[in-house]
Amino acid sequence: MTLPLFLKATQFLLILLLLVSASQAQNMNAEQLLEAAIQHHDPHQRWQNFNDTLIIEMTAPKQSPRKSTVAINIGLDYFYLQAQRNNINTTYIVDKNECELMLNGKISFNETEAKLNNLNCDRAYMLKNYYTYLYGLPMKAKDPGAIIQNSVLKTTFKGKEYLRLKVSYNEGVGDDVWFFYFNPKTFALEVYQFFKTDKNRNIIKESGEYILLFQETEIGGIKMPKIRRWYYNKDDKYLGTDTLLN
């Protein structure tokens, strides 16, 4: 059967647009790729004033599920995390530079209970940085102190083609080296990977983890990965899965 002329023209234009898009993606520098990715995930620039709550379930081999409620208010520099596992409820609050901790809803607990449940302010600040960094990607890759390698690598990871971006950090900001893998058609962030470094800030190849991202859900106007699956770099050992429930 012969296609009508207008259908042939439409088909040709579609193929041409796809070829142009693919060509542009391959010729992007790091800044252009990062901006395209941010446009995909945060088209209305909501992250800088993000104020919303994440409900996250974490599952891992040989562990009971952990359900966490995470509130992040970037404008007020406020972070709240309440995590529950096996009837133990731990709460970490960072309000600007003030830290508050609770165990099973109570602010009073002894030193043994604090150690057993890892309740301390250093961990509270670490958790704040952890959740705001990972759920704030790829926007957080533009934070002060980030060193973005200008070249973009077209590569394959676990059988899929990606555009890869390398980001390291100034001394005193961060010691890990991160690789971000973007879908070459949509520019969605689909994998991130980090490695530890030695005293000379060289990558330790057997260190670190990679995280596969699946699906997308919109929270606070931002497209976030609904599912994150964690693995060791050295042997692909599966570590666990984080799932956004909201």
Image (cartoon, rainbow, N blue to C red):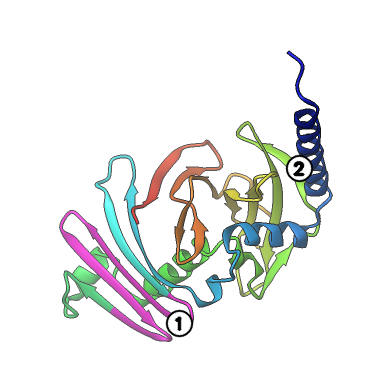
Is 87 within the magenta? yes
The answer to whether 165 appears left or right of 66 in the picture is right
Which residue lies at the image location 31% right of the left edge and 64% below the top edge? Answer: 69
Q: Is residue 74 left or right of residue 61?
A: right
Q: Amino acid at mark 1?
A: Asp
Quick one: quadrant of the C terminus? Answer: bottom left
Span of residues in magenta: 73-100
Q: Vertically, is 88 above or below 61?
A: below
* Snapshot quadrant of residue 6: top right
- Residue neighbourhood size for the residue with mark 1, other residues' Cα within 10 Å, grouped as few (<14), some (14–19), many (≥20): few
Q: Which mark is residue 154?
A: 2
Residue 99 in the image, given as x and y percentages of width and height: 35, 82
| Residue at mark 1 | 77
| Image location (x, y in percent) of residue 132 | 48, 68
Q: Quadrant of the N terminus?
A: top right
- In the rendered view, tell whether residue 241 sits above or below residue 96: above
Kindly state the secondary structure of the residue where label 2 is placed.
strand
In 3D space, how far apart are the residues under numbered discs 2 and 1 (Cα atoms)?
37 Å
Q: Residue furthest top?
A: 1
Badge 2 vs badge 1, beta-carbon distance below 8 Å = no
Residue 23 drawn at (x, y percent) = 83, 44
Q: Residue 129 vs residue 81: left or right?
A: right
For label 1, the SS is loop
Please report whichever mark, 2 or 1, sits nearer to the chain's N-terminal start. Answer: 1
At label 2, which amino acid type do we have? Lys
Q: Is residue 72 above or below residue 135?
A: below
Q: Dividing the picture into quarters, in which one does residue 46 lie?
A: bottom right
Any mark on residue 147, and which? none
